[in-house]
Amino acid sequence: MLAIGLMSGTSRDGIDAALIETDGEGASKGIAFHAMPYGEGFRLRLAEACGRAMAMDRPGFEPLIHAVEEELTELHVEAVSDLLARSGHVTQDVAVIGFHGHTVAHRPEWRWTWQIGDGAALAGAFGIPVVADLRSADVAAGGQGAPLLPVYHRALAHDLAKPVAVLNLGGVANITAIAADGEIVAFDTGMASGLIDNWMQSHGDRSFDENGATAAGGRVDEDRLAHMLADPWFAVPPPKSIDREAFTIDAVRGLPLADGAATLTAFSAAAVSRGLGHLAERPKRIYVAGGGRHNATLMRMLGDYTGAEVRPVDDLGWDGDALEAQGFAYMAVRHMKGLPISFPGTTGAPRPMTGGVLFEPA
């Protein structure tokens, strides 16, 4: 069936919308992809909503968060409309939409996670069933609710030599490690581009470090890097997940712009290496998806710190920009077929879980 997947990730830079053809099992083919960037004003409002949500002890009504949710949903309607127009398909062609929404707070230690976005409104806008709230059931059952992409990574990687790893670099980094016997372990490794973006926005005049050029001209402050890596979270064995707001740029304040960027980039790369230390079998190849793969300095540091061959997933013929959105389309189809999207080895859930809430159009 044809399915649309929507992703607004921890980088808070915009919406990824993908149209795929899939059976929700072994077959998946990308049809179209559209990336719609957020305006600067909405990015700031979204960041404020995330900050307010993280300060709450449970999800609930908060005026700013509610207003941002309404705006976020309207932007997703626009993204779907644009995707359909670009693809040449109409709403009647599409069986389901996988709607991730946007994570404003992630508290698996308190057994809740909060993704904003109105699934019912999105379903009503197009007359297409929507599967949303894909993480909450896993977290309520004791899982981490993240990462969810491993089920899609497994489907794509069935022909690859093992052991192998697929690393997604958004605001936060998460890895799917597939062992020689096919066993999957997945978890967040730490930050990816989130802190680098924060640094460039607060200390530079850019929203991100394009191609890692600023970091390439800086020097890594090894003492500050060691201090950041000493956080006890890195010693926690997987499965585990983390919120973008769990770390800040405070550790590098006072450094020149380039040195701060270099140190934060090294922090992301070294954290991946620390994560690989939790695996029984260290992968020799890491294929990288997400916006972070465009950062040449980060990619080089990943190779240096992990000792692995690091390559973009595009080398496999996959679309590294579309992968997450495609994955949520794939998961929506799995939900419709009653198939699990999270597993004990990927989120720590007590059993394979289907996840998601179905919103039928009125």
Image (spheres, grey):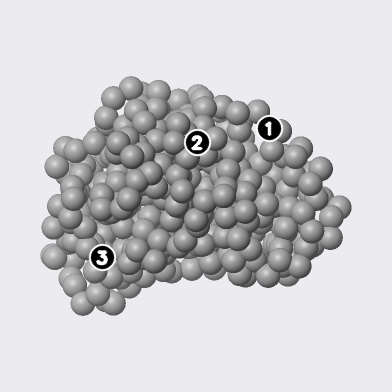
How far from the left and from the top, in percent, is residue 135?
37, 37
Residue at x-position 22% and y-position 63%:
29
In contact (CB < 8 Å): disc 1 and disc 2: no
Residue at x-position 26% and y-position 65%:
30
Q: Please determine whether, in this image, residue 278 is positioned above or below residue 51.
A: above
Q: Classify 10 Å Cα crowding around label 2: few (below 14), some (14-19), many (20 and above).
A: many
Residue at x-position 68% and y-position 70%:
213
Q: Circle 2 — which element? A: loop
Residue under numbered circle 1: 231
Give amino acid for label 1.
Asp
Q: Disc 1 to disc 2, how far (Cα)? A: 14 Å
Residue 30 badge: 3
Residue ranking furthest to the right: 254
Q: Disc 3 to disc 1, how far (Cα)? A: 39 Å
Quadrant, the N terminus: bottom left
Residue under numbered circle 2: 241
How far from the left and from the top, in percent, is residue 56?
57, 32
